[in-house]
Image (cartoon, rainbow, N blue to C red):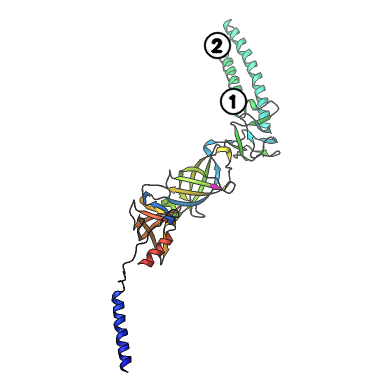
Amino acid sequence: MKYSAFYITALSMAMMVSCKQEPKKDDTPQPVCVSDSMSSRISLDTALISNINNQLQLSGEVGFNENKVVKVFPFTSGQVTEVKVSLGDRVSAGQVLAVIKSADIAGNYNDLKTTGSDIAIAKRQMENTKLLFEKGISSEKEYEEAKENYQKALTANQKITDALRINGGGNTNATGVYTVKAPISGFIVEKKANAGNFIRNDNADNLFTISDLKDVWVWANVFETDIARIHEGYSAQVKTLAYPDKIFKGKVDKISEVLNPDNKVMRIRINLPNDGLLLKPEMFTNVLIENTENVKAVSIPQDAMVFEGGKNYVVIYKSKCDLKLQEVRILKTENNRAYISSGLNAGDIIISKNQVLFYNAILENQ
């Protein structure tokens, strides 16, 4: 028993001495550093003050520019005997589009011939009466009546001549054939004439529509909730199913003042240059409207944030061994850019690639 007690006492003293001789443990956390090998695997970005790009996605369709369109109307009644163009054809100014056989034109030429004879007769009578009046055989009244009849014949002839000029001018002939010609060069974007069609005097419809298609309009639909986000002059990017990788750029140049009563949308018009004539009327389009007004905020790449627990964090970089976690609040995100309402200042440098590794390391070290 005495031996055991002595042994325990000695062992306890030895342990105490041993503890006193152990070095004191440092509980201070070591900083997380970016090693030289990791430097090549990270990217740094600077928080910037930038305009908030407020984008709006719309659907629409291509239409021709009505300011550069000519609608070709018939000038007389008759029957279409021949159509020489098809929808989409390129035509030159003066090219014959269609041929119409018109009884009205034929009648006008008959009337013109009649009035021509009337002029010749009235002129001879006036000259004879003048001669007799000068010799004192006819009265002045008879001479004045002859001059008036001659003037009436001239007026009647001029009236028919004007009618023929209005109804085609040199595009008609005495047999009543009327040729419809293209007033401008361009493309047939609308065709309503077919051989055999009858055209009535009261017909108000056009036969053809010609456009040069060098500029086109895109009409897009804006829902009522987005009306306040659209203004004239905003930039627009247009994509089509035919050319999914090509972006056509234009501007909003007209906004309708009324909503469509059927679908409650407002139409806006975008003017686009049509280089290469790639855009065709009736094409379906996706339209991206960009509002770049002077509303500014601090922005960073969206991929630079770490989302956890319903919050967003960034790793602020001050030096290789001075890293800090910072919670940020997002105002909005657009085009892989996050606009920050609080948590960052312009000029702050953040790790934007492989930042999750440092996020976890900083958490473990806290």
Residue drawn 61% across and 22% down? 157
The CA distance from mark 2 to mark 1 is: 33 Å
Q: Residue at x 58, y 13 (%)?
A: 142
- Say which amino acid is labelled 2: Glu
**For mark 1, what is the residue?**
162
Q: Which mark is residue 238?
A: none
Which image quadrant: the N terminus?
bottom left
Q: Residue furthest bottom?
A: 1
Q: Is residue 163 shown above or below 233?
A: above
Specify the farthest residue to the top: 135
On the image, the x and y values in percent for residue 240 come to 56, 47
State the image coordinates of residue 45 (x, y, percent, origin top left).
Answer: 40, 52
Residue extent of the magenta highlight: 239-243
Residue 299 image point, x, y percent: 38, 52
156, 175: nearer the viewer: 175
Q: Secondary structure at mark 2?
A: helix
Residue 101 appears in view: no
Task: Relative to 135, say whether 263 is above or below.
Answer: below
Say which quarter of the image contains residue 109.
top right
- The residue carrying pointer 2 sits among few (fewer than 14), some (14 to 19) or many (20 or more) residues within 10 Å by Cα, namely some
Residue 252 part of the magenta-drawn span? no
Read off the residue under disc 2: 140
- Taking the spot 52% from the left edge, 46% from the top edge, the residue there is 238
Lateral position of residue 321 relative to residue 76, left or right: left
- For the residue pair 14 and 48, the one nearer the viewer reads as 14
Residue 355 figure quarter: bottom left
**Residue 311 against residue 181 in the figure, above or below:** below
Give percent across and percent down for residue 8: 32, 88
